[in-house]
Image (cartoon, rainbow, N blue to C red):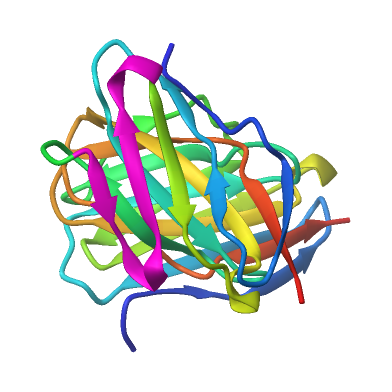
Amino acid sequence: AQSVTQPDIHITVSEGASLELRCNYSYGATPYLFWYVQSPGQGLQLLLKYFSGDTLVQGIKGFEAEFKRSQSSFNLRKPSVHWSDAAEYFCAGQILTGGGNKLTFGTGTQLKVEL
Amino acid sequence: ETGVTQTPRHLVMGMTNKKSLKCEQHLGHNAMYWYKQSAKKPLELMFVYSLEERVENNSVPSRFSPECPNSSHLFLHLHTLQPEDSALYLCASSQGRRDEQFFGPGTRLTVL
């Protein structure tokens, strides 16, 4: 069965420090992969996506992610975290189904930023 | 209005009530989705509509009844819910099968 795992439930970093959020996937083939961010009381906003090609993907708000097939990973990174980055981050994998597509989400990583 | 909107943003209902959640997308997309987000659990896909036809129903109890009257609107009709149905219900839309999904802000539902 397809699955996406985010091993870290909570992460705390200092403002200005670098960040890496982990994501591992388990699919029969390479899925499309996404990172979303959710601020309190809000819906999910897409940070970046990987379909194919270059394994280093650039997203919004200074985030990037690297697809590593050998490790079945798609980790999210940011060189310098801002206090406004505090939120919950979700990794998701996609398979195609019927006329739409089906996203399988990880359980999320709650990011806290210390000033 | 832009993007994906959901109303109401908050809803409190008793177990015997009937209510509906509304989702509207202003993006010209042709697929719409309902998700349930409960505390400490991954987002769960409930229903997928493509071109107004339901193409997926992930074993959702019959007390949840979706309706998609056109490609811009999606409803989730609720009746005789249970307290464990309390959650954030998110609507999303996408254009085509490969495009990313855009999410609304969600409806926070509390069942007493």
Classify B44 as above or below A48: above
Viewed as shown, does residue A66 lie left or right of B88?
left
Q: Position of residue A76 (x, y in %)?
A: 45, 47
**What residue sits 40% from the left and 72% below the top?**
A61
The quarter of the image holding the C terminus of chain B is bottom right
Q: Nearer the viewer, residue A93 or A114?
A: A114
Q: Residue furthest right?
A: B112
Q: Give the magenta part as a residue range.
A: A55-71
Q: How many marks?
A: 0
Classify A54 as above or below B100: above
Q: Position of residue A68 (x, y in %)?
A: 32, 27
**What residue sits 40% from the left and 61% below the top?**
A63
Q: Quadrant of residue A92?
A: top left
Q: Nearer the viewer, residue B72 or A105?
A: A105
Q: Residue furthest bottom?
A: B1
Q: Position of residue A47 (x, y in %)?
A: 38, 60
**What residue sits 32% from the left and 16% below the top?**
A70
Would residue A18 be seen by someone viewing this image from the given angle?
yes
Indicate whether residue A64 is drawn in magenta: yes
Indicate whether residue A76 is drawn in magenta: no
Viewed as shown, does residue B82 lie left or right of B106?
right
Viewed as shown, does residue B86 lie left or right of A102?
right
Would residue B102 be seen by someone viewing this image from the given angle?
no
Q: Position of residue B95 (x, y in %)?
A: 16, 56
**What residue sits 22% from the left and 40% below the top?**
A100
